Image (cartoon, rainbow, N blue to C red):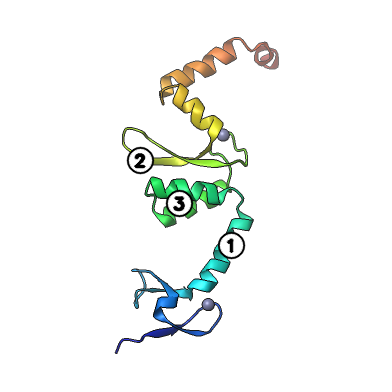
């Protein structure tokens, strides 16, 4: 017997199946929360995670798995992976392999881009800055 309706986990109301988003991981192929409650939950999530909406549109472009993406946002607390600033974030990805790396801000994204995504250049930049930074030497004394 296939049911055409189910009870929403959140609002406890019985609604037709097409009132639930499709979820292939579920037995009946639909989420346990109705579309309306899902929308509410998303709204709340957006309020708790500023900057999320902007990165979400980019996520779609890079076809990042939803769970993977949510884990990234959670673990980074909506902060740039590199400078730790809470800013508008980009989904950074390896331009050769298209593999997603992390969520980073525009400045850090540009920095990587200008360095040609080359770790050798970036570590040379660190050596360069440290070499000419007198305050570092003072600290060591
Ligand atoms: Zn509901
Ligand atoms: Zn940054």
Quadrant location of the N terminus in the rendered image: bottom left
Name the residue at the left extreme. Answer: 1
Q: What residue sits right under mark 1 in the picture?
A: 43
Quadrant location of the C terminus in the rendered image: top right
Residue 8: percent from left, percent from top: 49, 80
* Mark 3 and mark 1 residues within 8 Å of each other at the beta carbon: no
129 or 44, nearer to the observer: 44
Relative to 130, is 47 above or below? below
Residue drawn at (45%, 45%) of the image:
58
- Neighbourhood count class around disc 3 (C-alpha, 10 Å): few under 14, some 14–19, many 20 upward: some
Residue 139 is drawn in which quadrant? top right
12 or 18, nearer to the observer: 18
Residue drawn at (61%, 9%) of the image:
132
Residue 108: percent from left, percent from top: 53, 31
Residue 128 is drawn in which quadrant? top right
Q: Secondary structure at mark 2?
A: loop
Relative to 59, is 18 above or below? below
Q: Earlier in the sequence, mark 1 or mark 2?
A: 1
Q: Is residue 20 left or right of residue 138?
A: left
Disc 2/disc 3 C-alpha distance (Å): 13 Å
Q: What residue sits right under mark 2 in the picture?
A: 99
Disc 3/disc 1 C-alpha distance (Å): 17 Å
- Neighbourhood count class around disc 1 (C-alpha, 10 Å): few under 14, some 14–19, many 20 upward: few
The label shown at residue 69 is: 3
Residue 94: percent from left, percent from top: 37, 35
Q: Secondary structure at mark 1?
A: helix
The label shown at residue 57 is: none
**Residue depth check, mark 3 versus mark 1: number of the one nearer the observer:** 1
Residue 21: percent from left, percent from top: 42, 70
Residue drawn at (58%, 15%) of the image:
129
**Residue depth check, mark 1 versus mark 2: number of the one nearer the observer:** 1
Q: Earlier in the sequence, mark 2 or mark 3?
A: 3
């Amino acid at each position: 017997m296939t049911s055409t309706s189910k009870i929403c986990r959140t609002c406890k109301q019985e609604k037709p199946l097409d009132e639930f988003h499709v979820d292939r991981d579920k037995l009946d192929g639909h989420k346990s929360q109705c579309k309306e409650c899902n929308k509410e939950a998303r709204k709340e999530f957006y309020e708790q995670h500023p900057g999320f909406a902007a990165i979400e549109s980019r996520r779609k472009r890079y076809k990042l798995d939803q769970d993977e993406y949510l884990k990234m946002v959670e673990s980074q607390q909506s902060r740039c992976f590199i400078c730790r600033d809470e800013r508008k974030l980009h989904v950074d990805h390896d331009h050769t392999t298209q593999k997603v790396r992390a969520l980073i801000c525009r400045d850090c994204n540009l920095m990587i881009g200008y360095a040609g995504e080359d770790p050798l250049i970036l570590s040379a930049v660190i050596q360069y800055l440290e070499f000419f930074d007198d305050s570092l030497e003072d600290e060591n004394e």
